C-alpha cells in the first residue's frame, strides 16, 4: 500500500531504498512482537542464500531504467495474486533445503522489487510454521534480506542521508502499525484477509503501471 505512494512522490529509484530501510524496521518490530516463536533453523537456512542474493538483486535494480523498475514491480504485484491462489490449492511440503533454494530465488527478487511476501509467505507455511511462529520466523529471515539491500544501496550511493531519514519516518509508522494491527489480524477471518490482500496487490500493481506511463 505504501510503495505506490512513495514511487509517486520520489520515483522508484529512491522509493525502493526508502522501503528497504522501512522494511528493516517493520520486520524488527514483528520479531519483537513474537520473539519467543522464532524458528532459528528455518531462518538460517533461508538467510544463508537469501542475503547475498538480495544484495545482487539490489545491484541489478540500480542498473535498470526507472520505467523498467515501475513495470517490473507492477507485473510482480499483480502476478502474485494468481500465483498465491495456485500455491494455496497445492498441499506442498518444504524442508530446510527448500528454504535455502527459495531464499536464493526470493532474495534476488527482493533486491529488485519492494517485497516478495507473496512468495516467502507460502514457503514458510509449507515448512509447517503457523501463527506466531510463522510471523516471527518470516520476519527474522526477511530482516537479513532487507538489511543486505540497504547496505548495497548505501555502498553504491542510492541510500543517502536524506533517503535514510525518509526510510526512518516510514519505518516508524510501520513499526507502530505492526503492534496496532496485531489484535485486528487475530480476529480477521482468513478468507476476508486473503481477499483484502488480493485487492491491495492488484491496486498497487495497477498504480505502478500508471507511474510507468508518466513522462
Image (spheres, grey):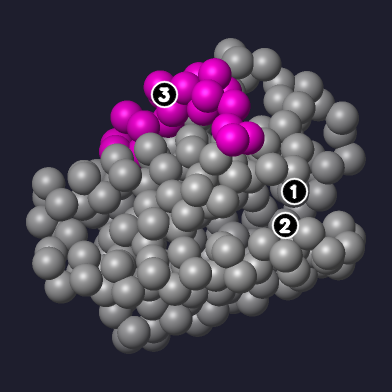
> What is the C-alpha distance between the residues marked 3 and 2?
25 Å
Query: In the current view of this chain or complex, which residue is farthest to the front?
Result: 36
Using a 10 Å C-alpha cutoff, classify the residue at mark 2 as few (fewer than 14 neighbours), some (14 to 19) or many (20 or more).
some
Q: Position of residue 18 (x, y in %)?
A: 31, 66
Q: Which residue is drawn at 15% across and 52% down?
A: 154
- The tag on residue 81 is 2
The stretch in magenta equals 36-56
- Residue indicated by mark 3: 49
Is 176 on the left-hand or right-hand side of 170? right
Check residue 50 for magenta coloring.
yes
Is 184 on the left-hand or right-hand side of 59? right
Q: What element carries label 3?
A: helix
Check residue 116 for magenta coloring.
no
Q: Say if residue 142 shows up in the picture.
A: yes
Using a 10 Å C-alpha cutoff, classify the residue at mark 1 as few (fewer than 14 neighbours), some (14 to 19) or many (20 or more).
some
Magenta stretch: helix, strand or loop mostly: helix
> What is the C-alpha distance between the residues marked 1 and 2?
5 Å
Using a 10 Å C-alpha cutoff, classify the residue at mark 3 as few (fewer than 14 neighbours), some (14 to 19) or many (20 or more).
many
Upstream in sequence: badge 1 or badge 3: 3
Marks 1 and 2 in Cβ contact (< 8 Å):
yes
Q: Position of residue 75 (x, y in %)?
A: 56, 60
**Looking at the image, is 19 positioned above or below residue 3?**
above
Q: Place residue 10 in its image quadrant.
A: bottom left
Q: Say if residue 68 shows up in the picture.
A: no
Q: Position of residue 214 (x, y in %)?
A: 39, 85
Observer-nearest of 38 and 51: 38
Observer-nearest of 64 and 41: 41
Q: Place residue 57 in its image quadrant.
A: top left
Q: Which residue is drawn at 58% across and 13% down?
A: 97
Upstream in sequence: badge 3 or badge 2: 3
- Residue indicated by mark 1: 84
Amino acid at each position: 500500500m505504501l510503495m505506490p505512494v512513495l514511487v509517486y512522490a520520489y520515483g522508484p529509484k529512491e522509493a525502493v531504498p526508502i522501503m528497504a530501510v522501512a522494511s528493516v524496521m517493520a520486520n524488527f518490530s514483528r520479531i519483537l512482537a513474537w520473539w519467543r516463536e522464532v524458528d532459528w533453523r528455518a531462518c538460517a537456512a533461508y538467510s544463508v542464500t537469501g542475503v547475498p542474493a538480495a544484495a545482487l538483486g539490489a545491484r541489478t535494480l540500480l542498473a535498470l531504467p526507472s520505467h523498467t523498475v515501475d513495470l517490473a514491480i507492477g507485473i510482480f504485484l499483480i502476478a502474485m495474486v494468481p500465483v498465491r491462489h495456485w500455491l494455496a490449492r497445492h498441499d506442498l511440503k518444504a524442508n530446510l533445503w527448500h528454504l535455502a533454494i527459495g531464499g536464493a530465488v526470493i532474495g534476488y527478487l527482493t533486491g529488485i522489487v519492494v517485497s516478495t511476501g507473496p512468495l516467502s509467505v507460502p514457503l514458510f507455511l509449507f515448512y509447517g510454521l503457523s501463527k506466531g511462529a510463522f510471523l516471527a520466523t518470516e520476519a527474522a529471515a526477511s530482516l537479513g534480506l532487507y538489511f543486505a539491500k540497504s547496505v548495497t544501496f548505501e555502498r553504491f550511493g542510492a541510500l543517502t542521508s536524506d533517503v535514510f531519514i525518509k526510510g526512518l519516518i516510514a519505518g516508524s509508522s510501520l513499526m507502530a502499525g505492526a503492534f496496532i494491527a496485531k489484535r485486528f489480524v487475530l480476529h480477521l477471518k482468513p478468507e476476508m484477509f486473503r481477499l483484502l490482500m488480493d485487492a491491495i496487490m492488484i491496486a498497487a500493481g495497477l498504480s505502478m503501471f500508471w507511474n510507468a506511463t508518466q513522462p
